[in-house]
Amino acid sequence: MNRKQIQSLAAQHGTPLVILDHDIIRRNYAEFRRHLPKVQAYYAVKANPAPEIVRTLFKAGASFDVASLPEFMLVYENIKDLPAKEQQDFIWDKIIYANPTKPKETLLALDQYKPLVTYDNLNELKKIKQFAPHAGVVLRLRVPNTGSMVELSSKFGCDAGEAVDLVVAAFQMGLVVEGLSFHVGSQCTNFENFVQALNMAAAVMKESRDRGHAIKILDIGGGFPAAYNRHVKPFGTLARKINAEIDRLFSKDIQIIAEPGRFLAATAATSVARIVGKAVRDGKTCYYINDSVYHTYSGIIFDHCQYPVRAFKRGKTEICAVFGQTCDGLDTISQSEELPSLEIDDLVYSENIGAYSNASATYFNGFPPAQVVHVNL
Ligand SMILES: *Cc1c(COP(=O)(O)O)cnc(C)c1O
């Protein structure tokens, strides 16, 4: 998407605006498949739950990772033109419920679909047995998250030492452990995390097999880094490492899946906002825009992500601050942005803002989330 197109869409639809380019979604999915041809991608819907993305990715051949009952239903409703026969295979082939902690009401509602769900402790397993006895289960391992932008290992995953006992416990309860999963942390730029996780999973699989329980699915989770800037190492380099470890550690009949969220969605969106205020404080120019960290820029808070703010205007730049539209001091988009001199009503934009952005937007201060336009649907 070039600057002219962004400007013309903003003129047409107004601001704040999020422009979501489905050509980029399809391109990211194709890139994932090209580099990891043995890995089926289950798009992590929470990164950007737009139903349009679900439909685009479904048509491209993707499956889905959901984190809640509403997300499960969102995917189910959008892909249900499924072949009626072999529906059970279809559900597992298309949806994994990968949030290791599930309220019992959710399990009750999910049981009729015989879903694939994750667990990482005995309490969760008992809950699954009681409220969703028809579910297949996947054990989530705790793996190193060193250097990832968002770390998950303090919240989820069983220790390697207890993993096989949790596999055995599931089978003793009459549940079937279909798979092992892990998550190396989001925007993982330390590729050794994947190497270590794959080795840990291989060891657990082997010990489980030795104790009579062969596990069929390996779920290598999310964390694949989006190319936010030129410092992010290429995906191909990571993929080569993953492919090499998979070939070395796992037999050919293990089905390998992954849960990319950010990698598929991040680079597909550009946000556009309007300058609604301008002031000088302590000698620094401060711009106020009609979006905020409670809205499209929520990733600054929740995702530890920065989104450079760019102007359409050319000219000599200076260091300035960019604030959001709300009354909260936390609502700071940047304390040091390089922008030319801008005026009220000028437009600014941020690229690569498709993941964990409008997904976590609120109505704080009475401002609704930005309108989303889909292009190249
Ligand atoms: C959030 C999440 C993902 C997606 O992670 P990305 O870093 O966006 O790829 C995948 N799996 C699980 C279980 C998650 O919680």
Image (cartoon, helix red, strand yellow):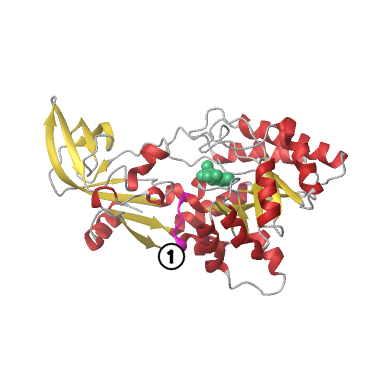
The quarter of the rendering in which ligand 1 is drawn is top right
Residue at position x 56%, y 67% in the image: 79
**Apparent side of residue 156 relative to residue 328 in the rendered image (left or right):** right
**Apparent side of residue 342 relative to residue 242 in the rendered image (left or right):** left
**Apparent side of residue 265 relative to residue 155 in the rendered image (left or right):** left
Counting from the top left corner in percent of width and height, residue 229 is at: 42, 37
Residue at position x 58%, y 47% in the image: 99
Counting from the top left corner in percent of width and height, residue 58 is at: 56, 63
Counting from the top left corner in percent of width and height, residue 93 is at: 67, 60
Image quadrant occupied by the C terminus: bottom left
Q: Amino acid at mark 1?
A: Leu
Residue 202 visible (yes or no):
no
Residue at position x 56%, y 27% in the image: 146
**Apparent side of residue 140 relative to residue 189 in the rendered image (left or right):** right
In the image, residue 201 above or below residue 170: above
Residue at position x 62%, y 46% in the image: 35
Q: Residues within 10 Å of mark 1 (few under 14, many from 20)?
A: some
Span colored in magenta: 47-51
Image quarter for residue 81? bottom right
